[in-house]
Amino acid sequence: MHLPIIISAAILLSLGLNLPVMSETTVEISQLTTNNNLNLRRLRFNRRLWNQANISNYRYTFSNSCFCIPDARGPVVIEVRNGQTTSITSVATGQPVNQQFFQKYKTIPKLFNVIQDAINRNAFSLDIGYDHKLGYPTRINIDYNSQIADEEIFLTIENFEKIK
């Protein structure tokens, strides 16, 4: 006679213990959607600023604080002419580096694409800084999944200058 009551109580108790986890998940999803919408609006606004500036010749110092080999970290100076990367050189040595390590980051439009990709993939955390005048990214910090270690990327864009 008491067995059905005990089983019912156990089921209710187990469901009750799971409620906070379910609630947090709903809140996290809601927050992620809100953050993605804000990040997407900021990306579009700053990409528009960059496109309006119509800069096709420029250079910047790029660093990648990733969990990757030292050659892929930089800092490097990336030079772009007519929208195409013409050189990537080590700040430390002044020598050319293996451009394969910097394919995703070798122009400002490619950096915007990195941000767009993180938004599209619903990255767990996205912290972006933009230049207030020209719109190019100055900081890109992405944690794609809070449950996975060492997949985050931390990009820094400094010393931007237009060149003739």
Image (cartoon, rainbow, N blue to C red):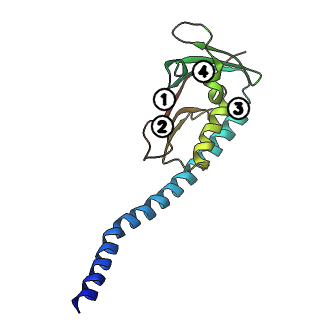
Relative to 87, 10 lies left or right: left
Cα distance, mark 3 to mark 2?
31 Å
Residue at mark 3: 53
The amino acid at mark 1 is: Cys
| Comparing labels 3 and 2, the label whose residue is closer to the camera | 2
Circle on res. 23: none
Query: For the residue labelled by badge 3, is the local secondary structure a helix, a strand or a loop?
Result: helix
Cα distance, mark 1 to mark 2?
7 Å
Cα distance, mark 4 to mark 2?
22 Å
Residue at mark 1: 66
- Pointer 1 with pointer 2, Cβ within 8 A: yes
| Comparing labels 4 and 2, the label whose residue is closer to the camera | 2
| Comparing labels 1 and 4, the label whose residue is closer to the camera | 1
- Total labels: the figure holds 4
- Examine the rendered structure and indicate whether residue 139 appears above or below residue 4: above
| Comparing labels 3 and 4, the label whose residue is closer to the camera | 4
Foreground residue among 9 and 124: 9
Relative to 96, 72 lies left or right: left
Foreground residue among 99 and 42: 99
The amino acid at mark 2 is: Glu
Quarter containing the C terminus: top right
The residue lying at 34 percent from left, 66 percent from top is 20
Foreground residue among 6 and 81: 6
Foreground residue among 146 and 4: 4
Circle on res. 60: 4
Q: Quadrant of residue 118?
A: top right
Which of the marked residues, 4 or 2, is nearer the chain's N terminus?
4
Residue at mark 2: 152
**Residue 31 position in % (x across, y down):** 47, 57
Q: Residues within 10 Å of mark 2 (few under 14, many from 20)?
A: some
